[in-house]
Amino acid sequence: MNLILFGPPAAGKGTQARRLADEHGMIQLSTGDMLRAARASGTELGKKVAGIMDRGDLVSDDIVIALIEEQIQQKGADKSYIFDGFPRTVAQAEALDALMRRHGTRIDAVIRLEVDEARLIARVEKRFKDEGRADDNPESFKVRLGRYNQDTAPLLPYYQAQGKLNGVDGMASIEEVGAGIDKALRGVKRQGKKAIHAG
Ligand code: AMP
């Protein structure tokens, strides 16, 4: 099963992706983590994206698509992946669908973490104080939210049209959100079995 964890910045995607990876033996693919790793090791790519990331803007589609493709090629398309923070534009979603198809696999479900903006802002203020992540500062976070609303939210109708969108309340505790995701995934698996029997 391949999943996309979808939601605005600071919705809890990373936390839940790590939990799913640990508990369900899936592989987390976070383009944000990959880009931060590139910066930390001082690669050309890291240097190229540093300013864009700190500002809260989106890195170009080509760069993140190539990162994801590389991972799937290395690890194999027979694994179960959780995409975290990717795709973030319709072009990325189309490229991901095409990539999965080329590898004989597919995205099975999109789990949308629903968190209202006031809660996101409160969370990120706390995270900025606790962890000091540069792009959590108020100006950059405003840009990130703006990018989400403008470029990423249009993916909701894209995945709705594919019948893959599952909403989960992301406002509760980490454990409760995790339980909500597991419940949604059980529903996806049941639907998958029905589809196989019907087909
Ligand atoms: P994240 O940790 O997912 O919030 O990502 C941190 C930053 O990395 C974002 O604000 C973007 O600058 C960049 N980034 C991560 N994933 C993507 C993506 N799929 N498309 C474009 N930029 C991305």
Image (cartoon, rainbow, N blue to C red):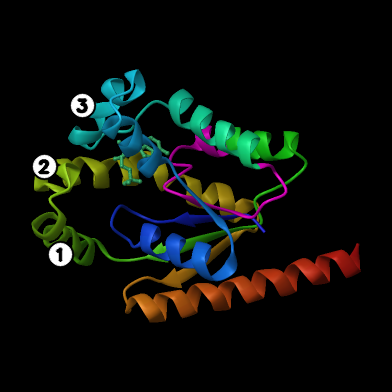
Q: Position of residue 31 (x, y in %)?
A: 42, 40
Q: Give the class, few, some or many, for how many residues have Cα within 10 Å of label 3's Cα (few <14, many ≥20).
A: few
Quadrant of the rendered image holding ligand 1: top left
Q: Earlier in the sequence, mark 3 or mark 2?
A: 3
| Image-based side of 188 in relation to 40, left or right | right
Q: Please, is residue 53 above or below residue 184 in the view?
A: above
Q: Is disc 2 placed on a helix, strand or loop?
A: helix
Q: Amino acid at mark 1?
A: Ala
Q: Which residue is mark 3?
A: 51
Q: Which residue is mark 2?
A: 139
Distance, label 1 to label 3, CA atoms, is 25 Å
Q: Position of residue 147 (x, y in %)?
A: 30, 40
The magenta stretch spans which residues? 76-94
Q: Give the class, few, some or many, for how many residues have Cα within 10 Å of label 1's Cα (few <14, many ≥20).
A: few
Q: Amino acid at mark 3?
A: Gly
Q: Which of the 4 image quadrants contains residue 152?
A: top left
- Determine whether label 3 and label 2 are within 8 Å by CB: no
Q: Please, is residue 193 above or below residue 150 in the view?
A: below
Q: Which residue is mark 1?
A: 122
Front one among 165 and 186: 186
Say if disc 2 is inside 8 Å of ligand 1.
no
> Of all residues shown, which one is farthest toward the front?
41
What residue sits 33% from the left and 33% below the top?
A: 58
